[in-house]
Image (spheres, helix red, strand yellow):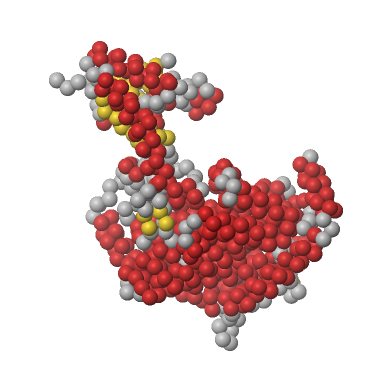
């Protein structure tokens, strides 16, 4: 009934607007022309290789933070769980933002289409081996997230009325000044803000709208993307400009349930195919070092794995630092500990689930003779059933076990997309107002631009959208990591002091 | 000799006034002191939007200020006028658990609570404050109709 109504509505819109395809193509061509030079710069390879320098930048940073903080992501993992469960929470702080709330709010901005569509893109281009590098990137990214979120709390602005502003812009301007790099702080903060605005329009907006549209067409049939874009833009408009907060509040409550449902369904598929789990991990390990016939081999798998992990968990990017900065704590380092759970949940758990389901269900075509994956040179990825990629590939993988799952995934994708958009509209807004000052006119300008980009994202092809989204997110990391290097001794001092006090029993377990 | 302490779970609405009047009458008769407790329902595990997270501290201050000026201060003034020594406490958390905890800390001998919401469908399924107190409180609890 609903499907028939929806199909009829789309049909009506399609007939009434004959220029629909031309609108999508025009948007695609116009936006791609503007974004291509930026994308090319961010993903330009190291001389004499095909390895993008930006990926190396992230890998090196995550490795340095991991070593510098003596594998803090593993050492502090149990303590992070204790903090999130509220064991150390001060009862006098009840009513303030708890560690759990800061973590789940930040997660609602990161858990989304990167986990569903992004992983599918990674394994279809980089092969199953991309999963290995994705997990590794997730584990190391925990140290990057720990660093940036500690700094975000330490250098946040706390106002007399109780309001808080925090994030990379603030630790860049305040922290770098404190370290004797005052001349660098402000320009870096401005540069970060520019990239953050672009990131919010790209990965936090266009990519989400694009893949939400892809899943809707997957269910209801093809129709112009700009229609989805306009509908989405109107809803986003109602929330961020119209002040219809109830939509955001409802979404915020449903999204965690959808995440649980998604992981639950993936687990059921894995249990149903338990005999293939060992084989799937074999494919992941073999593919990580040989490529298993995928063009690009080891390097191709590594690049895709790291790219999609960074895009999904945003470690080193600086976005989640804005969300974590509002927590109530006397010890900034505690939020760092809590935040390191974010890449773990996002990448090591959820992304791996998606990858395993795609590999195990056999939606990627393999040559039965050689065991190698069939490479579709024209599309530049592994051949798949129905030649699909992105969210459609994940949907096909889940549908091979549960025919009805694409419907659930459709709802999940729309909600994830919407929740990520709302979170990123806030990150973008904070960066925008940092540059142009607080004020209704400035805020309204950004919010209108944000809504327009929803339409662009839904109307464009996946290729240009994902390139621009990646480039914008990575550009944020480019600037953020410079500040993290300069400020990491501050984090180490905080960490050492806290760990000593924790061992001496200064902090009581309150609950 | 120290006076008995009665805890009043005070909501500030019409039912709250009935509870307060009843507790005042009992306190006068027993020469007891009152401890008015107003709990702002809160869970640290509730999901918040990005904007709610950013504004939480500010909102908390506003909520505390409203509870203090609109609710607690007039109630304390009423108790003072009635000649009953009364203290007030405003806290965030789970209502039933906190009232039981505060009553325990104050070594209270009775709890007074209104019947608000105890007959709603949600209360029947999830339990209401008076029913929760009746079940959990280690001291006598008076549910004022």
Instruction: Give the camera-side residue of B33 and A392.
Output: B33
Q: As drawn, is B115 to the left or to the right of B7?
A: right
Instruction: Check the image and name the residue furthest to the top.
Output: B29
Residue under the point 39% across and 22% down = B16
The quarter of the picture where the C terminus of chain A appears is top left
The quarter of the picture where the N terminus of chain A appears is top right
Q: Position of residue B23 (x, y in %)?
A: 32, 18
Instruction: Give the camera-side residue of A19 and B103.
Output: A19
Q: Is residue A295 visible?
A: yes
Instruction: Check the image and name the residue furthest to the left.
Output: B1
Check the image and report above or below for B139 versus A432. above
Residue under the point 26% across and 20% down = B81
Q: Is residue A85 visible?
A: no
Q: Position of residue A314 (x, y in %)?
A: 51, 63
Residue under the point 54% across and 64% down = A197
Q: Position of residue A444 (x, y in %)?
A: 56, 56
Q: Which of the 4 quarters of the picture holds residue A359?
A: bottom right
Q: As drawn, is A265 to the left or to the right of B71?
A: right
Check the image and report above or below for B63 versus B83. below
Q: Position of residue A432 (x, y in %)?
A: 51, 62
How many labels, in total?
Answer: 0
Q: Which of the 4 quarters of the picture holds residue A156?
A: bottom left
Check the image and report above or below for A240 versus B78. below
Q: As drawn, is A492 to the left or to the right of A197?
A: left
Residue under the point 56% across and 46% down = A243
């Amino acid at each position: 009934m609903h499907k028939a109504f929806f199909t009829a509505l789309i049909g009506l819109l399609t007939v009434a607007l004959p220029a629909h395809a031309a609108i999508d193509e025009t948007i695609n061509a116009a936006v791609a022309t503007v974004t291509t030079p930026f994308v090319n710069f961010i993903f330009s390879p190291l001389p004499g290789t095909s390895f993008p320098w930006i990926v190396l930048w992230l890998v090196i940073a995550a490795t340095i933070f991991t070593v510098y903080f003596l594998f803090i992501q593993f050492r502090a993992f149990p303590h992070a769980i204790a903090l999130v469960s509220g064991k150390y929470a001060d009862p006098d702080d009840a009513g303030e933002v708890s560690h759990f709330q800061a973590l789940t709010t930040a997660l609602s901005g990161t858990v989304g289409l990167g986990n569903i569509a992004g992983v599918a893109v990674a394994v279809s281009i980089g092969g199953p081996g991309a999963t290995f590098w994705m997990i590794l990137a997730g584990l190391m990214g925990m140290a990057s997230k720990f660093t940036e979120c500690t700094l975000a709390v330490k250098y946040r602005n706390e106002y007399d009325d109780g309001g808080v502003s925090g994030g990379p812009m603030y630790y860049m301007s305040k922290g770098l000044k404190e370290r004797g790099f005052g001349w660098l702080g402000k320009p870096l903060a401005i540069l970060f803000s520019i990239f953050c605005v672009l990131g919010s329009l790209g990965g936090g907006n266009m990519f989400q709208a694009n893949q939400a549209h892809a899943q809707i067409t997957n269910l209801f049939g093809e129709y112009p993307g700009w229609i989805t874009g306009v509908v989405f833009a109107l809803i986003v408009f109602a929330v961020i400009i119209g002040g219809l907060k109830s939509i955001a509040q409802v979404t915020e409550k449903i999204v965690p349930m959808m995440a649980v449902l998604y992981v639950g369904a993936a687990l059921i598929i894995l249990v149903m195919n338990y005999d293939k789990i060992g084989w799937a991990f074999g494919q992941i390990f073999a593919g990580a070092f040989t490529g298993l016939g995928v063009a690009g081999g080891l390097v191709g798998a590594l690049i895709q794995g790291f790219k999609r992990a960074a895009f999904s968990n945003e470690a080193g990017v600086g976005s989640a630092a804005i969300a974590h900065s509002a927590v109530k704590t006397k010890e900034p380092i505690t939020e760092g500990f809590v935040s390191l759970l974010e890449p773990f949940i996002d990448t090591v758990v959820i992304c791996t689930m998606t990858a395993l389901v795609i590999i195990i269900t056999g939606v990627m075509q393999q040559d039965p003779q050689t065991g190698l994956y069939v490479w579709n040179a024209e599309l530049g990825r592994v051949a798949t059933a129905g030649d699909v990629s992105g969210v459609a590939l994940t949907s096909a993988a889940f549908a091979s076990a549960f025919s009805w799952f694409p419907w659930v995934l459709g709802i999940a994708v729309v909600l994830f997309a919407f929740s990520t958009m709302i979170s990123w509209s806030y990150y973008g807004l904070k960066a925008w107002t940092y540059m142009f000052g607080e004020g209704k006119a400035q805020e309204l300008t950004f919010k209108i631009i944000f809504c327009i980009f929803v339409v662009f994202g839904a109307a464009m092809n996946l290729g240009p959208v994902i390139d621009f989204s990646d480039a914008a997110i990575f550009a944020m990391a480019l600037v953020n990591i410079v500040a993290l290097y300069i400020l990491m001794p501050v984090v180490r001092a905080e960490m050492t002091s806290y760990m000593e006090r924790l061992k001496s029993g200064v902090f009581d377990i309150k609950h | 000799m120290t006076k008995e302490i009665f805890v009043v779970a005070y909501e500030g609405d019409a039912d709250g006034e009935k509870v307060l009047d009843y507790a005042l009458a009992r306190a006068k008769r027993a020469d007891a002191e009152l401890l008015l407790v107003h709990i702002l329902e809160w869970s640290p595990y509730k999901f918040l939007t990005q904007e709610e997270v950013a504004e939480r501290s500010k909102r908390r201050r506003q909520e505390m200020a409203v509870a203090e000026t609109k609710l607690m201060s007039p109630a304390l003034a009423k108790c003072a006028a009635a000649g009953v020594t009364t203290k007030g406490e405003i806290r965030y958390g789970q209502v039933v658990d906190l009232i039981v905890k505060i009553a325990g800390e104050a070594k209270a001998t009775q709890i007074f609570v209104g019947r608000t919401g105890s007959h709603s469908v949600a209360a029947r399924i999830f339990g209401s404050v008076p029913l929760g107190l009746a079940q959990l409180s280690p001291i006598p609890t008076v549910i004022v109709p």
